[in-house]
Image (cartoon, helix red, strand yellow):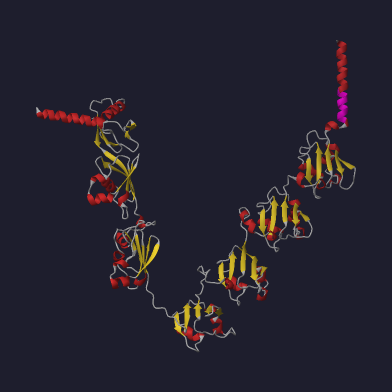
């Protein structure tokens, strides 16, 4: 009897559990239907709360109990499967879907059993990476974020420290701030050598200690203990000059005095955030009334005892002489009274200077500077009084040391020469004179080289000068941003019907065809007979006109105008004569033509060419009486041309003479005398017919 009661109790509990448990994300649902192999297996609840069933598709099941799930799936499968007698559904595995992010080896989503904890979730994500901050793990749910100390759990094993997991929770592992901002291999041993803390309350110990770093502050810890944490002081430590900054106030501590006396009251107070610095012990400084100082690029810099008749060479030789990095042209002698002298040792050894060796007395200092390298940024190593600036289109623009025996050509060679984009005919040179006034030169390097000029023709360069090598313009299609840097005096403007109108940089050695070719030539709409050039380099306004078509027909170079930089070239459009040409430069074609209007005319054209340009005569044209009104040479004179007769005789001598400014008029047949007579006769016949009809009536 008791056995049956226990079984009944277990069945009741199982039924109660089925009704209380609701489907969660990640659960595995088992569907059993005898005879159907596609259904007899486990289905995982996806992240959107659905399962995908064969023959049915996607069904949302999240949040249902097992009893409700049995009913819903039975209703969905009944229309597809006829025999549902053995159908059953149950939760095969209760699982959690957790997102593990941050400083883990395999971040992403993991499926866990329903009883899993945080440690299992971290293990499923590949474990923690070296450098993870264990005391500030975050468990983020839809409602809040729980920050917990995972390190404390590992130390104590207290499960109450770990928060419970639910599906769709996010477990985030932060990185320790001690690993820096750059992804590198984390070495815990090295990090330990650098201290054990990184917060604002840590004690910073650096200088002449074996292991510099930041160390955790504990109340009552003395300076000696922090020095021991840092591995103790080195043999170079200046223990008599230890500096301690506490609460923003620096304190000087003599460790040697403390060790000699044992007086604990000498120890400075250490508070959270204090800084301890142990300086390096320096050798004894040599000083005296007979000392000469040698510094810079010599083999043995230092302070040397001077004698009565000691010379500059004696001191320099005792210091080992200049190194191979020494700038021996600019040796400085700093006198005891503060004055500074320059000495060119290179010129002295080459015998190119009349100056003798500088006198050296006790208290003087000799400074041998480092030779400047063109490959390094040496702005502070070269004084503005001995430097020149090279900017623009050169290989290595920058600031360079200048020597008076150099020339502009030497300087350009020193900077690598002009680039392929350099306008070598337009180099600006700004040079100060002996009084500091700036003089401007515009230097044409191309002309200098082509004429094999002497170097005396080069601009004068002095220290403090600026040389700018201009750049050639880019393609006019996209160089408008560069126009502000392009000199107007060096430019030619090309407008109208060309392939690439714009602002071009040229020299006066180029001709009209060079400029037109650079602008991609005329377009198919260009009026080659009426090209206009505005000459702006003359004292008064001047415009010339070019018949380029005639040049192409004759090849006469005298037709091409002389073009200078600053001029403007305009190629008009053929179909805009009304706006671009005055009436004195065209011929009017009026009357019974298909396209009456104003047309360009040249001396090699005839009235037949004009009529063809006007589209020919219309169907009602009175071609026997075409009138040509000559206004260009003979006022109030008109000629009559019979086009019908010309078509029969082809007598070209009968063609009327036409010049620009004339008018050609083609009358309509309805305006002829015969046409008017026919109209009158037709009116008479109509009246007679009307009178006869009235008589009959």
Predominant SS of the magenta segment? helix
For residue 530, above or below residue 506? above
Q: Residue furthest left?
A: 1
Figure quadrant of the C terminus:
top right
Residue at 86% in and 26% down: 679
* In magenta stretch: residue 681: yes
The answer to whether one can see residue 576 in this image is yes
Q: Position of residue 424 (x, y in %)?
A: 63, 66
For residue 476, above or below residue 310? above
Residue at 77% in and 55% down: 543
> In screen coordinates, is 597 left or right of 124?
right
The answer to which of 93 and 156 lies nearer the viewer is 156
* In magenta stretch: residue 583: no
> In screen coordinates, is 187 left or right of 380?
left
Q: Position of residue 480 (x, y in %)?
A: 63, 54
The answer to whether one can see residue 418 in this image is no
Query: Looking at the rendering, which quadrant does residue 538 occupy?
Result: bottom right
> In screen coordinates, is 552 left or right of 253?
right
Q: Position of residue 243 (x, y in %)?
A: 37, 67
Query: Looking at the rendering, which quadrant does residue 392 occupy?
Result: bottom right
Query: Looking at the rendering, which quadrant does residue 623 occupy?
Result: top right
Total count of labels: 0
Q: Position of residue 132 (x, y in %)?
A: 32, 53
The answer to which of 613 and 78 lies nearer the viewer is 78
> In screen coordinates, is 644 left or right of 134?
right
Figure quadrant of the N terminus:
top left
The answer to which of 637 and 278 lies nearer the viewer is 278
* Magenta span: 674-682
Residue at 68% in and 62% down: 507
The answer to which of 290 and 220 lies nearer the viewer is 220
């Amino acid at each position: 009897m008791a056995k049956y009661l226990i079984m009944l109790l277990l069945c009741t509990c199982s039924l109660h559990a089925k009704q209380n448990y609701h489907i969660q994300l990640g659960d595995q649902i088992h569907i059993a239907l005898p005879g159907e192999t596609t259904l007899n297996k486990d289905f995982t609840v996806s992240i959107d709360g659905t399962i995908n069933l064969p023959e049915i598709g996607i069904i949302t099941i999240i949040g249902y109990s097992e009893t409700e799930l049995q009913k819903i799936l039975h209703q969905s499968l009944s229309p597809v499967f006829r025999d549902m007698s053995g159908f059953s559904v149950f939760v095969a595995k209760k699982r959690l879907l957790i997102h593990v992010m941050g400083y883990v080896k395999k971040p992403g989503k993991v499926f866990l059993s329903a009883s899993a904890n945080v440690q299992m979730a971290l293990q499923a994500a590949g474990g923690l990476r070296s450098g993870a901050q264990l005391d500030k793990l975050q468990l983020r749910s839809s409602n809040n974020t729980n920050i917990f100390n995972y390190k404390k759990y590992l130390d104590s094993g207290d499960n109450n420290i770990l928060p419970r997991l639910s599906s769709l929770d996010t477990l985030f592992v932060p990185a320790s701030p001690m690993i820096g901002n750059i992804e590198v291999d984390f070495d815990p041993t090295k990090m330990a050598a650098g201290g054990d803390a990184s917060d604002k309350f840590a004690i910073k110990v650096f200088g002449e200690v074996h292991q510099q770093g930041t160390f955790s502050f504990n109340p009552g810890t003395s300076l000696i203990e922090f020095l021991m944490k840092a591995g103790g002081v080195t043999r170079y430590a200046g223990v008599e000059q230890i500096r301690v900054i506490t609460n923003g106030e620096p304190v000087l501590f003599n460790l040697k005095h403390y060790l000699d006396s044992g007086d604990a009251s000498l120890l400075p107070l250490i508070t959270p955030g204090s800084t301890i610095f142990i300086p390096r012990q320096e050798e004894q400084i040599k000083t005296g009334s007979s000392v000469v100082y040698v510094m810079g690029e010599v083999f043995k810099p230092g302070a040397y005892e001077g004698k009565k008749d000691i010379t500059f060479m004696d001191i320099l030789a005792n210091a080992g002489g200049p190194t191979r990095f020494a700038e021996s042209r600019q040796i400085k002698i700093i006198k005891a009274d503060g004055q500074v002298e320059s000495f060119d040792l290179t010129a002295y050894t080459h015998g190119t200077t009349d100056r003798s060796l500088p006198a050296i007395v006790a208290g003087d200092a000799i400074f041998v500077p480092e030779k400047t390298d063109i490959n390094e940024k040496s702005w502070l190593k070269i004084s503005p009084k001995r430097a020149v600036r090279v900017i623009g289109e050169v290989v290595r623009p920058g600031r360079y040391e200048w020597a008076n025996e150099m020339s502009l050509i030497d300087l350009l060679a020193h900077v690598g020469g002009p680039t392929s984009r350099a306008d070598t005919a337009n180099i600006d040179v700004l040079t100060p004179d002996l009084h500091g006034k700036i003089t401007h030169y515009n230097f044409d390097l191309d002309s200098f080289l082509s004429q094999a000029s002497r170097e005396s023709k080069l601009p004068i360069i002095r220290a403090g000068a600026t040389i700018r090598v201009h750049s050639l313009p880019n393609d006019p299609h996209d160089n408008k941003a560069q126009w502000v840097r392009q000199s107007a005096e060096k430019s030619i403007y090309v407008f109208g019907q060309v392939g690439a109108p714009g602002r071009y940089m040229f020299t006066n050695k180029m001709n009209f065809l060079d400029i037109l070719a650079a602008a991609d030539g005329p377009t198919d709409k260009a009026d080659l007979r009426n090209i206009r050039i505005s000459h702006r380099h003359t004292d008064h306004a001047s415009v010339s006109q070019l018949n380029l078509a005639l040049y192409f027909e004759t090849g006469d170079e005298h037709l091409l105008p002389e073009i200078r930089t600053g001029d403007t070239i305009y190629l008009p459009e053929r179909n805009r004569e009304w706006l671009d040409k005055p009436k004195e430069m065209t011929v009017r074609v009026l009357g019974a033509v298909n396209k009456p209007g104003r047309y360009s005319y040249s001396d090699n054209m005839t009235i037949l060419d004009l009529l063809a340009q006007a589209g020919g005569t219309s169907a009602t044209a009175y071609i026997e009486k075409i009138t040509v009104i000559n206004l260009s040479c003979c006022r109030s004179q008109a000629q009559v041309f019979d086009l019908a007769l010309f078509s029969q005789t082809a007598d070209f001598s009968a063609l009327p003479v036409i010049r620009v400014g004339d008018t050609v008029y083609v009358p309509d047949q309805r305006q002829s005398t015969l046409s008017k007579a026919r109209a009158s006769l037709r009116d008479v016949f109509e009246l007679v017919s009307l009178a006869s009809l009235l008589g009959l009536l």
